[in-house]
Image (cartoon, rainbow, N blue to C red):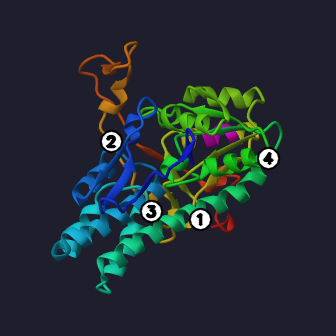
Amino acid sequence: MRIGKRSYQAVNWHSESGGVQWIEQRLLPHRFEQIVSPFPEEVAVAIETMQVRGAPTIGATAAYGLALAWKADRSRYFDYWVPRFRSTRPTAVNLFHACDAMQQCAETDPSNDEMIERAEAYAEAEVAANRAIGAGLAEYLAVGERRILTHCNAGWLAAVDWGTATSGIYHLAHAGEKPFVWVDETRPRLQGARLTAWELHQEGIDCRIQADSAAAWMMAQGKVDAIVVGADRIAANGDVANKIGTYALSLAAKAHGVPMYVAAPKSTFDLGCASGKGIPIEERDGGEVVEMDGVDCKGEVQQIRVAATGVGANNPAFDVTPFENITAIVCESGVWRP
């Protein structure tokens, strides 16, 4: 997708250096920076520290990181590097699918180039799936005044390219429609305010950032025509793990008769997990809740504390929305049913 007049992907193989290149998402929207690394450990840390985030992008980054590990440290590949990447984040199942794909390739004793090609094929498959998701999803979002509400960032930064939830919005815009997007800020890391709004602005799509708690009121006012979110893992019964706050959105949507769609590629499905009760929920550091960073009036990044010193915080990164609260789950092959 576009940044200014150029097209980018969230992560890619950097052939000039023989390393992995990714957009440092923690710096956005104030600064755009790409990082290139030839070291698999730095790629693993990038996933852990949310330099890259979003289930499909996490998976693609792990695939590239494991291709790099095969080239750099083949003797420890199965005993160390595959477990190392599997341990970087617990909830997004795409990570584990990517690790499985790269491990299976490594078991055939491929060349370095073949491992890189396998990682690139994994990432390209995600992009193709996201594009297909958007083509189908656009039909469901083309209702009323096209006022669409999103939560967190399920855009191209989170999905290598196109995005999952935003793919349908981009398809509408490219078809000459004029969608309007309510962007939940998404506490505590503000992925909506920092990333989704920035993406939409780059694409020239009208949007407004709002507090997460404003969403239900906008529905009650009749100002939301549809909701679309991404997913980090979908269980066999259709329960969806996504960014914290998604479950509350689903309750409000059900109460107000607003259709709520989940957009996700098949790599996000975990058919070995019977229900949402079996999905591990990542508990992140409480500092994300009680501290914030941003740019001051001088353009300098500052970190501040917004809560009383000594007060702790509860910080579950995800919640689980039951399938019965969801209008439809849209994947690359159409509407998916449990």
C-alpha separation, residue under disc 3 versus residue under disc 1: 15 Å
Which type of secondary structure does the marked residue at label 3 adopt? helix
Earlier sequence position, callout 3 versus callout 1: 3
C-alpha separation, residue under disc 3 versus residue under disc 2: 19 Å
In front: label 2 or label 4: 4
C-alpha separation, residue under disc 4 versus residue under disc 1: 22 Å
Earlier sequence position, callout 1 versus callout 2: 1
Q: Can residue 330 be seen in this view?
A: no
Q: Where is residue 22 in the image (x, y as percent from the top left)?
A: 38, 50
C-alpha separation, residue under disc 1 versus residue under disc 2: 31 Å
Locate residue 84 relative to residue 15 in the image: left or right: left
Which type of secondary structure does the marked residue at label 1 adopt? helix
Circle on res. 142: 4
Q: Residues within 10 Å of mark 4 (few under 14, many from 20)?
A: some
Quarter occupied by residue 258: top right
Find the residue positioned furthest to the front: 16
The amino acid type of the residue labelled 2 equals Arg
Quarter occupied by residue 85: bottom left
The amino acid type of the residue labelled 1 equals Ala
In front: label 4 or label 1: 1
- Residue assigned mark 1: 128
Q: Give the range drawn in magenta.
A: 249-253
Q: Position of residue 295 (x, y in %)?
A: 39, 21
